[in-house]
Image (tube, helix red, strand yellow):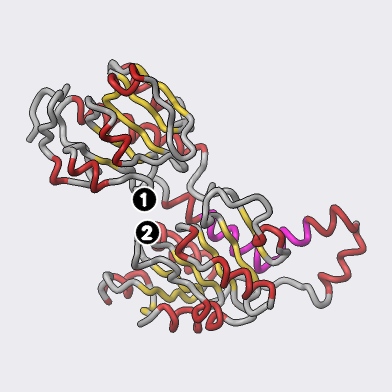
Amino acid sequence: MLCISLNSMLHEAGPETLRAGGFEFKAVAANPTPSLSDSERAETVALVARNPGRVTAEIIRALPRLQIISAAGAGIDHIDVSAATGAGVPVVNNPGVGPRPVAEHVVGMMLALTKRIAVADRRLRTDGWTTRRAFLNEEMGGELTGKTVGIIGLGAIGTHIARMCRGGFEATILAYSPSKSEEHLRALGITRANTVLDLCAASDFVVPIVPYSNKTHHLIGERELRAIGPSGFLVNASRGAVVDQVALFQALTERRIAGAGIDVFDPEPPEPGDPLCSLDNVIVTPHIAGLSIEAVRELSLSSAKQILDVVAGRRPPFLVNPETWPPAREGSVLGGDNA
């Protein structure tokens, strides 16, 4: 049995677990599509997909023995789930592991922005100690403590961010999350915002943390950026296209918002010379918010264990397309109890 990983699984715990379970394992570069040999296409039973690698309908059709597709993390926007479902191939993801490091990254960006840590670092390296004068006067930073943090999307990551900011910095938390009940928000000490625009207008920090879809495309656009105002910050660690980056660049260059922390881009990777990367009121990182030594090990193991579950005929715990279970694809290598 062959498991192909579109880009590395980032930690050897997963490949080691798969090999111990009887798999041959190969990592193949995919940016965004892989180049697979005829024998690899014929033998692949499992796929692990890590961005920017994409699992398209064409790839699924080309793998006659494919029995499972595993996202490397929680996000599945790089996998054609509809095509997999049509082919009877289970898709799994790995929720519950990534929220902690993403939340810490977001809070770290919030602190770095308001304290002007990245700016101070660059200035000290280039201009020397005399740059301290500017930070004693017009470029002095602020505090996160006591500020209002607006979170769009109160899933696992948003909830972690809310708890960190409320517990650690006595922040007021607003949330736009129509699916969450008043009881749920009240238990977390969170105030509901009725619209995204209302949230932006009332927040010192705006954090969209939603899955990408047609509904969330450019969820933060020119109107929302104007509502944030010249003292507010935006931090995006969800998906690049959740924010209208052209409107964001204009708002930042015109100082209509104070700054932004950006871990995700549209397109991704960004083009060389992306204008957002040239601004001194922006902190950029290369889509690493969900990565930590601890998290990548857990994610790698979760992917491997779910692959082994499927080939053993056990329903995996994080099945994205339950209509494919029990699987009945021609050429199946499955055995055991499919209940």
| Amino acid, disc 2 | Pro
Residue at point 13%, 46% (across, down): 323
Report, in whole angstroms, how far the alpha carbon at label 1 lies from the one at label 2: 8 Å
Do labels 1 and 2 touch, CB within 8 Å? yes
Residue 88 % position (x, y): 16, 38
Element class at badge 2: loop
Residue 280 % position (x, y): 73, 64
Q: Which residues are magenta?
A: 104-121
Disc number for residue 211:
2
| Amino acid, disc 1 | Asp
| Residue toward you, 277 or 271 | 271
The answer to if 60 sits in the magenta stretch is no
Mark before the other along the chain sequence, 1 or 2:
1
Main secondary structure along the magenta-highlighted residues: helix
| Residue toward you, 321 or 123 | 321
Residue at point 81%, 70% (across, down): 135
Element class at badge 1: loop
Location of residue 228 with respect to 187 vertically, above or below: below
Could you classify mark 2 by the number of other residues whose Cα lies within 10 Å: few (under 14), some (14-19), or many (20 or more)?
some
Q: Which residue is mark 1?
A: 77
The answer to if 112 sits in the magenta stretch is yes
| Residue toward you, 284 or 189 | 284
